[in-house]
């Protein structure tokens, strides 16, 4: 199974900060990566697909980049509603796998 | 408006069985792959499995942790997805989400719509 390792596991930041979360795949996955945001008690919400495509309705402060084994999710200017847990996910091969999550907290 | 509504979550004893349902509306259900994803309390997301559409012969894929115990099926006439869970273990305790596996191609696939989830506690 392809393993996805996110870093950091948790992060404290302030409103207005630029934040980057990384996701490393255990083998090359081309651009078959998505990013999700999850708030407590809610289902995940798709933010980015195909590594860098912004899902409809998602604010442009979110962006994704990378290919093969190294990927990043960047939030250009944190807003209060962005404090949540973020997951990467690969679709290159079965089993579909998620990263362990990055919890973004208010500093 | 797209809605995925899970039901059937209940307390079950280890070794028991349970069937979850997911009712879909607002999408052409029959066109799409459908997946189950679970989340143990306080933990991350774990993909459970997938059922493809009729064009792909309703074939299925499963995570190793549930293969041989869980069965995913669908009824396109009812816009419904199912998860039959057998031989349940304590470690199957989780919120179970149904989600649409939107696949634009063999290399572009993601989960764009999610239900709110249904809790399955496995405990004696």
Image (cartoon, coloured by chain):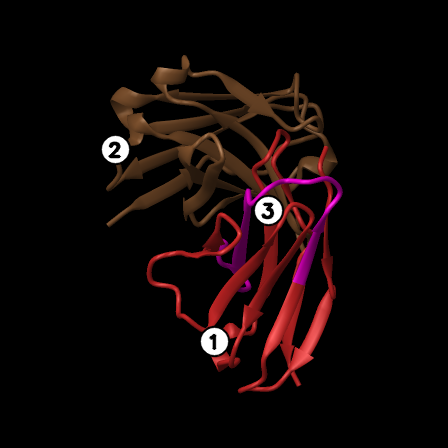
Chain colours: A red, B brown
Q: Nearer the viewer, mark 3 or mark 1?
A: 3
Residues behind callouts 1 and 2 on a single chain: no
- Number of numbered tags placed on the structure image: 3
Label disc, if present, on residue B28 of the rendered structure: 2
**Outermost residue, top direction?**
B57
Task: Please give the chain letter of the residue carrying mark 2.
Answer: B
SS of the residue under disc 3:
strand
Marks 3,1: beta carbons within 8 A: no
- Reply yes or no: does residue A41 show up in magenta: yes
Label disc, if present, on residue A81 of the rendered structure: 1
Residues behind callouts 3 and 2 on a single chain: no
Is B95 placed left or right of A53 in the picture? right
Task: Please give the chain letter of the residue carrying mark 1.
Answer: A
Residues behind callouts 3 and 1 on a single chain: yes
SS of the residue under disc 2:
loop
> Which residue is painted at 31% across and 37% down in the image?
B24
Residue range in magenta is: A22-45
Residue A34 seen in this snapshot: yes
């Amino acid at each position: 199974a392809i393993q996805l390792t996110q870093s950091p596991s948790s992060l404290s930041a302030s409103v207005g900060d630029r934040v980057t979360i990384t996701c490393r795949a255990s083998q090359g996955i081309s651009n078959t990566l998505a990013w999700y945001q999850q708030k407590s008690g809610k289902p995940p919400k798709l933010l980015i697909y195909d590594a860098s495509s912004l899902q409809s309705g998602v604010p442009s402060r979110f962006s994704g980049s990378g290919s093969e084994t190294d990927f990043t999710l960047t939030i250009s200017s944190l807003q209060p509603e962005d404090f949540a847990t973020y997951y990467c996910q690969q679709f290159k091969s079965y089993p579909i796998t998620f990263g362990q999550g990055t919890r973004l907290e208010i500093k | 408006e797209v809605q995925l509504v899970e039901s059937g979550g209940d307390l079950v004893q280890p070794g028991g069985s349970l069937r979850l349902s997911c009712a879909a509306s607002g999408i052409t259900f029959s066109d799409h792959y459908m997946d189950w994803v679970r989340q143990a309390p306080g933990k991350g997301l774990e993909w459970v499995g997938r059922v493809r559409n009729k064009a792909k012969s309703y074939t299925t894929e499963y995570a190793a942790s549930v293969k041989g115990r869980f069965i995913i099926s669908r009824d396109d006439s009812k816009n419904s997805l199912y998860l039959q869970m057998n031989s349940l273990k304590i470690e199957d305790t989780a919120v179970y989400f149904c989600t649409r596996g939107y696949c634009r191609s063999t290399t572009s696939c993601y989960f764009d719509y999610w239900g709110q989830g249904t809790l399955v506690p496995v405990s004696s």
